[in-house]
Image (tube, rainbow, N blue to C red):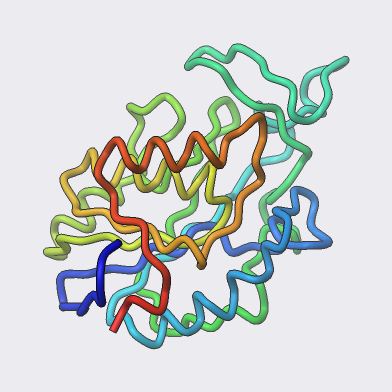
């Protein structure tokens, strides 16, 4: 358990996919996903630097179960880049579901990273597509800005938050996950697997109250 953390100009908050479709009433709702919004709003008051991510799929995306006749949501397929969970259609470009939650208050966000916009490859991480090779450009942006530590929050804990945290670590950033500012889907034990993965890379897992 870490104690209180003091922020510096070299810290950035990465708020992942706080979008309508990932909250109750959305097309891929994370259970209690809306509960992250007030926590992230309070975090936005504490951080000088904030980056948002936005899932941004074209219609007919490879990851949609509807793109694979006979397949159902949450089944697995083998894509050219490896195993891929099939999802309900969600966060389709220029639809209300792809929009940020209206109650998200992040006026000082300096960058919005859109991901998953390539039709033939999904993108959980804010840093790389699911092939773990194709970059979003976020690593270079954070390095050029001189950031050292990345704090990750948002939706879903066991997918886009997890892979963003792993890739932040891979990029050489100290990585902190704010767990009470996240909610998980928990597909086949994915929440427990995420906690193990974060421990393996040495990511700190904290609560929002621990940030001074």
- Indicate the position of residue 5 as horizontal and vertical percent values: 23, 75
Residue drawn at 41 percent across, 48 percent down = 126
Is 89 on the left-hand or right-hand side of 42? right
Residue drawn at 53 percent across, 38 percent down = 192
Is 54 on the left-hand or right-hand side of 49? right
Q: Is 169 drawn above or below residue 45 in the view shown?
A: above
Residue most toward the bottom?
45
- Indicate the position of residue 205 as horizontal and vertical percent values: 36, 57
Quadrant for the N terminus in the image: bottom left
- Indicate the position of residue 3 as horizontal and vertical percent values: 25, 72
Is 77 on the left-hand or right-hand side of 80? right
Is 99 on the left-hand or right-hand side of 82? right
Residue most toward the front?
1
Quadrant for the C terminus in the image: bottom left
Q: Is 160 drawn above or below residue 70 in the view shown?
A: below
Q: Quadrant of residue 207?
A: bottom left
């Amino acid at each position: 358990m870490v104690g209180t953390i003091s922020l510096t100009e070299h810290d950035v908050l990465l708020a992942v996919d706080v979008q309508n479709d990932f909250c109750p009433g959305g097309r891929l709702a994370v259970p209690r996903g809306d509960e992250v919004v007030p926590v992230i709003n309070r975090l936005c008051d504490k951080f000088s630097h904030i980056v948002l991510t936005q899932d941004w799929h074209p219609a007919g995306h490879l990851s949609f179960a509807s793109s694979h006749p006979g397949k159902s949501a949450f089944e697995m397929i083998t894509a050219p880049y490896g195993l891929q969970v099939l999802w309900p259609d969600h966060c389709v470009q220029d639809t209300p579901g792809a929009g940020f939650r209206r109650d998200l208050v992040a006026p000082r966000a300096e960058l919005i990273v859109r991901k998953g916009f390539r039709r033939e490859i999904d993108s959980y991480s804010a840093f790389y597509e699911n092939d773990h090779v194709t970059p979003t450009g976020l690593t270079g942006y954070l390095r050029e800005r001189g950031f050292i530590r990345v704090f990750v929050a948002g939706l879903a804990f066991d997918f886009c938050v997890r892979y963003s945290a792993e890739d932040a670590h891979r990029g050489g950033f100290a990585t902190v996950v704010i767990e009470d500012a996240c909610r998980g889907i928990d597909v086949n034990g994915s929440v427990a697997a995420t906690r193990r993965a974060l421990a393996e890379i040495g990511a700190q897992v904290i609560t929002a109250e621990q940030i001074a």
